[in-house]
Image (cartoon, coloured by chain):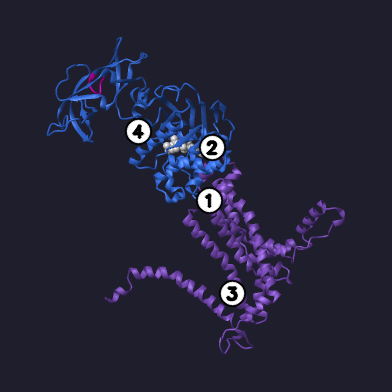
Chain colours: A purple, B blue
Amino acid sequence: MKPASWFDRRGWSDLIIGLPYAWAIVFIFLPICIVSALSFAVPILNSPPYEFLKTWPYLSFDNFQRLFSDSIYIRAFAVSLFNASIATVLCLLIGYPMALGLTRVPKAVNRVLLMMIVLPFWTSFLLRVYAWIGLMGNNSWFNHLLTGLYNVVVPQAWHIANIQIMYTNFAVIFVVVYSYLPFMILPLYANLEKLDRTLDEAAMDLGSRPVQVFLDVTLPLSMPGIIAGGLLVFIPAAGELVIPSLVGNQSDPMVGAIISQEFGLNHDWPMASAISVALLVILVMPLMAYTRFQSRAEAGGTR
Amino acid sequence: MDRDPLSATPSDRFISVRTVTKQFGQFTAVDRVSLDIGKGELFALLGSSGCGKTTLLRMLAGFEEPTSGQIFIDGEDMAGIAPYHRPVNMMFQSYALFPHMTVEKNIGYGLKHERMTKSERDDRVAAMLDLVQLKAFARRHPHQLSGGQRQRVALARALAKQPKLLLLDEPLGALDKKLREQTQFEIANIQYETGITFVVVTHDQEEAMTLASRIAIMDSGSIRQLDTPKNVYEFPSSRFVASFIGSVNLFDAELVRQDDQFAHIAVPEIGVTLQALRRGQLHGKTRLTCAFRPEKVHMSRQPPASAVNTMQGVVQDFGYFGKDSLYRVKMPAGSLIRVNATNDLRAGDDDIVATWEDEVYLAIDPAAIMLFEDEA
Ligand SMILES: Nc1ncnc2c1ncn2[C@@H]1O[C@H](COP(=O)(O)OP(=O)(O)OP(=O)(O)O)[C@@H](O)[C@H]1O
Ligand SMILES: [Mg+2]
């Protein structure tokens, strides 16, 4: 073998194919391994603040036992999944008509609207959450407005001075929906825009009214977009830390806050890792279901 | 079918399009089109790209509203009637099969709005699958089919509801020549068996000639001629139609005189005076267009018996197509006449009528010469 030939065109293509794998290994797979390993350690008062058992089986299952027995953790998971589910459904209900609308407006309008959907990303996320804190507070004009509207519709006896929005789960869901809506709209729009409009006409030609056309043609064909958008909202929403810690109910924390607390305040790295691993497993399951769905759909013909 | 397939007008007005115009902004896509189509007819809309065929079809299906004019289907005014309420089904140019449904689901889709029991529905789907010979493919998805099979699914889906009117937008556009010819006969057969009225859009004149009982030739939004395939070919009403359908020799001519039977015309480009059988009165215009089809010119190396409409020229070149050859014969005046000669001999050297540089005689029957009063 000539010395120059060890790195030929084949080598380049291997390198290029290898890069994403290398990335995934170094930044995704290895950290997951480390965190998984840590979740089987025990905390100590030292640096680093953990160690593995000195005797067989070397791994401790205490963290997972605590996870499944302590109601704090279970409740945190329940609250997280509840909030994320509601937020995802709301994002879908709000985002789907918007994405569909985007495909039906003239091109010039479409571009402006798309711009407006992406525009909030230009400003800091924290700033936008703080803006909502200002709006939701008990003495804000927004709160007064909502309270006023509420008082108009309910009988005198039920009148209130203001609505407690801040520091509730409602506030968390509300701000999560606001923050993550673009992540629902954009994949949905990309999917809906690709759909062949003559399919709608064909369905209509065969006797379906517009609503039926939507249910029979548009909705099933947009399933990949719904799932992609749903995952993009659900996964980060379930692990959300900033929004619940700023606007949420501190006595009823979500998983993100618990992890942060264990890791920072309690210096219990193994417990934090165990919670992370559990969250990962819970979140990976829908992802795997999605991949299954997609490969089945590909075999079945849904584009 | 209770009407003579060769007559030029339908006995009934099953579909009636009355001075329909469609404008997109300033642009007129369909311009005052009027036509009547009889029940059970296979009607073809023929025209070059962008002449408004699809637009006219979409107005029949209800996807576009006419800017002005009316459309009647089976005596009913279609104005304001939505596509899903019309007794019309369409086979789309792109087939528009539902990718997430199997072949049988596709075919049965329109039936779920009909009042039928499930078993009736299944029977109809099975009958349709039989008709288009796709029984074995019932459970497949469209992307698992060949182009020709998809086209047949689209046809079956459009037929399943047994509409009063079936619209086919370039149904065979995506098929290769062989499959195309085969499918043309299939479509004609299905039309005959079902008795459904078909309107077929095409820009392939052979397809239109093969399929249709009548053809409407469209040009920039309006109908230039509406007649049987034979009449459109043999008796085109204008220079445009003559040159659009088939190939033709076209020359400017001047009317010299008319007698009872013949019009005598001078054709300076050929350098002769021809006599043409008169059909109707020429309205005193002296500048005419004279046209004759290449296969109507008789070519020989010996002088023909009759001297009527005889010319002499030199074979400039020719193309051999197997069953016939196309010659281009140069006239003394400089112009070229295209002549089609059947290769009906199979022998040694004498198996073709003429070859390069041969002196040949051309003769045209006076009945074969078409005269148009519109100029180029
Ligand atoms: N929605 C529309 N808006 C503006 N112009 C249109 C619209 N639909 C069609 N046209 C124009 O109307 C004319 C006729 O279009 P149409 O689709 O009927 O042509 P066609 O005869 O079917 O052509 P082809 O053989 O290429 O399919 C074209 O010039 C087209 O650009
Ligand atoms: Mg068209």
Q: Chain of mark 1?
A: A
Compared with A179, B182 (above or below) is above
**Are the residues flagged by discs 4 and 3 from a single subunit?**
no
Compared with B83, A91 (above or below) is below
Ligand 2 falls in quadrant:
top left
**Are the residues flagged by discs 4 and 1 from a single subunit?**
no
Label 1, secondary structure: give it: helix
**Are the residues flagged by discs 2 and 3 from a single subunit?**
no
The magenta-colored residue range is B267-272
User: In this figure, which residue is indicated by the disc labeled 1?
Assistant: A193
Q: Residues within 10 Å of mark 4 (few under 14, many from 20)?
A: few
Mark number, residue A277: 3
Q: CA distance from mark 1 to mark 2?
A: 20 Å
* Residue depth check, mark 1 versus mark 3: number of the one nearer the observer: 3
Mark number, residue B206: 4
Q: Chain of mark 2?
A: B
Residue at screen point 45% across, 49% down = B142
Across and down, in percent, residue A36 comes to 56, 78
| Picture quadrant where residue A161 is located | bottom right
Count how many numbered circles sit on residues in the image: 4
**Residue B298 appears left or right of B99:** left
Q: CA distance from mark 4 to mark 3?
A: 70 Å
User: In this figure, which residue is indicated by the disc labeled 2?
Assistant: B63
Label 4, secondary structure: give it: helix
Residue B121 or residue A19, whichever sits in front: B121
Please, what is the three-letter code of the amino acid marked with disc 4? Answer: Glu
Figure quadrant of the C terminus of chain B: top left
From this viewpoint, is residue A43 visible? yes
Upstream in sequence: badge 1 or badge 3: 1
**Are the residues flagged by discs 4 and 2 from a single subunit?**
yes
What secondary structure is the stretch in magenta mostly built from? loop
* Residue depth check, mark 2 versus mark 3: number of the one nearer the observer: 3
